[in-house]
Amino acid sequence: MKIKALPAHERPREKLIAKGVDNLTDIELLAILLRTGRAGKSALDIAESILSKYSKKRILDVTLGDLRAIKGIDAGKACTLLAAFEFTKRAMGAHKNGRPIIQSVEDALAQLHDIRSHKKEHFVALYLNDRNELIHREDVSVGTVNASIVHPRDVFAPALEHNATAAIVAHNHSSGSSEPSPEDYDVTGRLKEAGKLFGIQFLYHLILTKDEYSTVRQNP
């Protein structure tokens, strides 16, 4: 059924105006962004199909290709959705001075979504000040992550340069498994010890794949 055929009080936009945005379902909110449907399917139908495929947590990391693969999503709709999702991610981490606040693993993940699908392993460091604000992100290395490539000086030199008080590191596993390797534990242990020497708190080491992540905190 087309949205125009619904009673006025059931149409997403009219419902938003009458009752406020908080009273809309997830499907109705997404339908408003889509604006229109396709032959035989309303914007509500397409929104429902999107949310049945992607959870609210995963939907923020969908790609242009993911959206274009859904019937009824053309380039214009995909761009609108991607822009809304990116703005949401930035707003979730934004502080009054524009710096993202990193208070949880989820906050850190929001700053690292771009490395999830890389074919090579990218090792990244996030540096925080004493207010948990992200003050710098450093792309440390590209390639296989091991003790010889990821050296503590490469991680902590930028931390000292930017007067960071804490550091988080992360890399992607192109294999699709977030299970830490022996090398991952070795790197984590070396960085923890180096952090103590430099007086910079080493918080944790994240391993990301397209669909999951794990946290390396200590040797197994």
Image (spheres, helix red, strand yellow):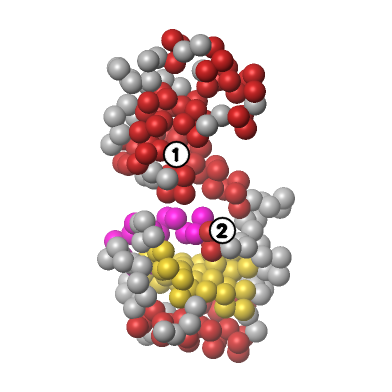
Mark 1 vs mark 2: give the one in front: 2
Can you see residue 151? no
Report which residue position mark 2 lands on.
107
- Mark drawn on residue 144: none
Q: Amino acid at mark 2?
A: Asp
In terms of depth relative to the viewer, which is nearer, 198 or 34?
34
Secondary structure of the residue carrying tag 1 is helix
* 185 vs 17, nearest the viewer: 17
Let me know if residue 200 appears in the view: yes
* Secondary structure found at label 2: helix
Q: Please tell me which residue lies in front, 160 or 109.
A: 109
Alpha carbons under labels 1 and 2: distance apart? 19 Å
Left or right, 25 with reference to 133: left
- At label 1, the amino acid type is Leu
Number of numbered callouts drawn: 2
The stretch in magenta equals 109-122
* Rendered residue at 35%/33% (across/down): 49
Near-viewer residue (95 or 42): 42
Which residue is pictured at 54% across the width and 63% down the height?
105
Question: Which of the two discs, 1 and 2, labels the residue nearer the N terminus?
Answer: 1
Residue 122 location (% of width, % of height): 38, 67
Residue 61's spot in the image, x, y percent? 42, 48
- In the figure, is residue 138 to the left or right of 48? right
Is residue 72 shown above or below 104?
A: above
Residue 18, relative to residue 177: is it above or below? above
- Mark 1 = which residue? 82
| Vertical relation: 148 (above or below) 64 | below
Pinpoint residue 9: horizontal percent, then vertical percent. Answer: 56, 15
Location of the C terminus (image quadrant): bottom left
